[in-house]
Amino acid sequence: MGDAVNQDFAERYGPWAIVTGGSEGVGVSWARALTERGVKVVLVARRPDPLEQTAGWLRERGAEVRTLALDVTATDVVEQLRTVTDDIEIGLLVHNAGAVSRDQKWFLDEELSSIESVIALNVNASARLAYAYGKPMRERGHGGIVIISSLSGTAGQPLEAAYSASKAFGQVLCEALWNELKDHGVDVVSVPLGGTLTEKLKQSNLDIDMDAIPTADEIVDEAIEHLDDGPVYVPNASNRKFFETVSRMPRRDAAEKMARLAYRTHPIPAS
């Protein structure tokens, strides 16, 4: 990518970006891709050690990085973030933080606290962060909001009911904000992910073909070229086909398709 293209990108989405869940997996790939395009990053994640390791790696590559060890489900997430962002201009928000807990249980057998944590992460945090950082973007007339969603949110998926529902919220929020902000120069896009080859996925016991799954870098390198193709952009041709197919189905058919997928990849718990 040429210097002129990088400069255009940084002017549109910089000078700083926030990446939640920025210490590992897909978050690291977003941080890497953004800094390669001349954008400085504020990395946010719960665990300080991986966070600082990622920041150190990026700084060795010449990037300017700030970090904040923070659980974004906290009700004062914005107030805490402002301690490291009030003196800089945030031109891009990437809410990438993943699931707090995904035990693949029946909804009624989950701990209510786990359900509420997933909702706090994917619903409350999405709304709070978009509200706080979207307003200045609208006033400046440029910027971007990216909410990482999931193919699980395309239709209700059993064994991950709360996760599935909360990921659907992020997509619908992006669709609404895309309409509200497109005439103000602010790009909004939901990026639903399917299986993505990360260390965490490699260590899982899911019955899937790991060789057929795109890497985090491949997903992000495609998605970052489509920030202005909202309100929804699904990276990876196979995932995009799945999303489009399920989205066109009658809702009962879509829900049943999601159930077949869930029961094929996850062990069915006892009733």
Image: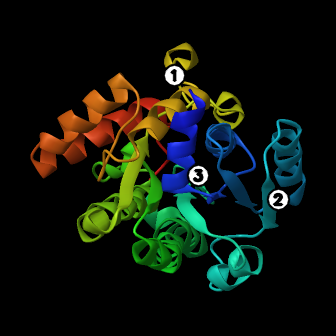
Spatial CA distance of label 3 from label 1 is 21 Å
Q: Where residue 81 sits: x, y (%)?
A: 70, 76
Query: How many numbered discs?
Result: 3
Residue 28 lies, with reference to residue 46, above or below; the image says above
Amino acid type of the residue that numbered disc 1 sits on in the rendered structure: Ile
Q: Residue furthest left?
A: 250
Spatial CA distance of label 3 from label 2 is 20 Å
Residue 44 lies, with reference to residue 210, above or below; the image says below
Point out the frontmost of discs 3 and 2.
2
Mark 2 crowd level (few <14, some 14–19, many ≥20, 10 Å Cα): some
Q: Residue furthest top?
A: 211
Amino acid type of the residue that numbered disc 3 sits on in the rendered structure: Asp
Please tell me the numbered disc located at residue 103: 3
Give the structural element (helix, strand or loop) at label 2.
loop
Please tell me the numbered disc located at residue 213: 1
Residue 9 or residue 232, whichever sits in front = 9
Residue 58 placement: quadrant? top right
Q: Earlier in the sequence, mark 3 or mark 2?
A: 2
Spatial CA distance of label 1 from label 2 is 26 Å
Query: What residue is at 26 percent from the left and 28 percent from the top?
Result: 241
Residue 145 or residue 91, whichever sits in front = 91
Give the structural element (helix, strand or loop) at label 3.
loop
Amino acid type of the residue that numbered disc 2 sits on in the rendered structure: Arg
Q: Is residue 170 left or right of residue 9?
A: left
The residue tagged 2 is 47
Give the structural element (helix, strand or loop) at label 1.
loop
Q: Where residue 20 sits: x, y (%)?
A: 64, 59
Q: Where residue 130 sits: x, y (%)?
A: 47, 72
Q: Where residue 129 sits: x, y (%)?
A: 53, 73
Residue 95 lies, with reference to residue 225, above or below; the image says below
